[in-house]
Image (tube, helix red, strand yellow):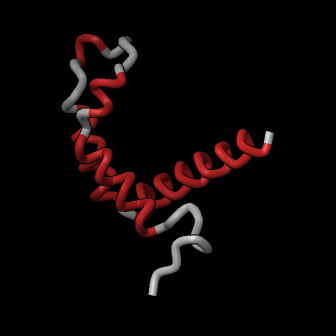
Amino acid sequence: MQFVIADYETTSTALAYTSHVLVTHPNEHLKLQEHIGSRFNPDTDNEVSSYETISKMEYLDMFIGEALRIYPIAPVAINRQ
């Protein structure tokens, strides 16, 4: 049960931090929105995205990585000088 709670906590914290970065940086928000929107066909909006489609979104991966670099999940374990 402890692993489930620990996993939930890190996921929710990561989502909170990335949401915070999106709100505080509107230019990056628009850039990410355009990047994601370019990967989908407007005629098939009702289709669920696949893992392959999401894994090919380089900018999304860079954005999440940068948000987690700025706001690490476990700041006690990752100490920056």
Pick the residue in front: 34 or 70: 70
- Asked if residue 7 lies left or right of residue 55, the reply is right
- Asked if residue 79 lies left or right of residue 35, the reply is right
Query: If the image is split into quadrants, where does the N terminus sit?
Result: top right
Q: Residue at x 34, y 58 (%)?
A: 26
Q: Residue at x 52, y 72 (%)?
A: 78
Pick the residue in front: 62 or 35: 62
Q: Residue at x 30, y 42 (%)?
A: 33
- What is the quadrant of residue 65 in the picture? bottom left
Pick the residue in front: 55 or 39: 55
Mark count: 0
Q: Is residue 52 above or below residue 11?
A: above
Residue 35: % across, % down:
22, 40
Residue 71: % across, % down:
49, 67
Query: If the image is split into quadrants, where does the C terminus sit?
Result: bottom left
Residue 7: % across, % down:
65, 44
Residue 46: % across, % down:
38, 12
Which residue ends up furthest to the right in the rendered image? 1
Q: Is residue 81 above or below residue 64?
A: below
Q: Residue at x 41, y 55 (%)?
A: 22
Which residue ends up furthest to the bottom in the rendered image? 81
